[in-house]
Amino acid sequence: MIAKIRAFGAFWYDFIIGDDWRVAVAVGVALAITYGLSRTTAVPVWWIVVVGVAIVLPLSIRRVTRRRS
Amino acid sequence: MSGSALFIAVFLACLVEAVEALTIILAAGTARDWRSAITGLVTALLSLAVVVAVLGPAVSVIPLSGLRLFVGGLLLIFGLQWLRKAILRASGNKALHDESAAYQATLTAAQQASTRRRGIVADWYAFTLAFKGVLLEGLEVVFIALTFGSNQHDIGLAAIAAIAAVLAVTVAGCAVRAPLSRVPENSMKFVVGVMLTAFGMYWGAEGAGAHWPGSDAALLVLIPAVALYALALVAVFRRDNTSTSVAGDPAAPRRESLS
């Protein structure tokens, strides 16, 4: 039973999080910062997620290419 | 703009997944038993229908800002997975998806497995192969169609796009009776990755309280910007490969173009 629950969890982890959990963490952090700042300041915050993606995507790809070289 | 983008994203994602599912069903049917493979296909489609029936209404009752934050975040994580793999493939750091090779590999494995009967299913291996293949590929489509459809308040259009793609692949599959290896899957995955990432950023940030300059029109900038950035990353990581090859590494990954 525990093995089945574990396999079920592993499937959803793989389905949503995928190969690199750091990407999911970065997205979560970027959205949390956006949420926090939008509630406390009047400055535009739309760019935070854009910058987060621009940083995390090459880093994630770099990690794979470095592993292979 | 948003309606056509929704249709294109769901249609392409569904087309790619349907092509992969078709390959698995063809291998299960050809190498094993067609009746069991089709039983697996129908069972998987019914399971997906149950998932849609349960998740569809559940998603539609969530308040829009919460939905956009949660679903936009998930879509962004999901889209970045697609885009990351597409960039790795296009830059030669990951083998391009080859439907003929996938078919041969699945066919060989299916031919070597032993036959076992379970209940009304004559060949359990063919059944589970078709069932798992369709369910796994279909879940991605359901996820994309539901997230796009619910955010745009147009689950009907998302469903039409998904059904149109499945019908197109079914008709083509019946006509050629072989894996659809000429479908430009790798390019289509790249486009889907770009769209999921752009829409994920847009909805995620909006759900978190951000206001995009120009509102919906921001997508007209966001989608091409993500595409250009992804293409730039392909060029950068391809150059990395070239320098590795020049350095004399015989195991350097092969370089292939995105087409």
Image (cartoon, helix red, strand yellow):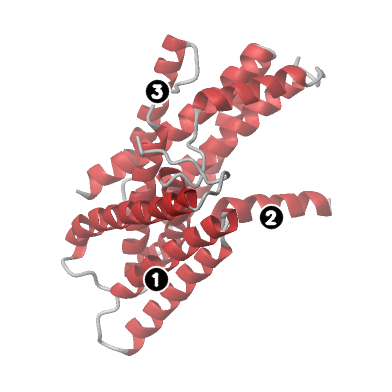
Q: Nearer the viewer, residue B211 or B245?
A: B245
Q: Which residue is mark 2?
A: A9
Mark 2 residue type = Gly
Quadrant housing residue A18 = bottom right
* Left or right side of A37 for B95: right
**Label 1: how many residues lie within 10 Å, few (<14), some (14-19) or many (20+)?**
some
Q: Nearer the viewer, residue B25 or B240?
A: B240
Disc on res. B182: 3
* Left or right side of B245 for A1: right
Q: Chain of mark 1?
A: A
Question: In front: mark 3 or mark 2?
Answer: 3
- Label 1 and label 3: CA atoms lie apart by 36 Å
- From this view, report whether residue A62 is shown above or below residue B146: below
Q: Chain of mark 3?
A: B
Image coordinates for residue A9, horizontal then vertical, percent? 69, 55
Q: Secondary structure at mark 1?
A: helix
- From this view, report whether residue A34 is shown above or below residue B256: below
* C-beta proximity under 8 Å, tags 3 and 2: no
| Marks 2 and 1, the one that precedes in the sequence | 2
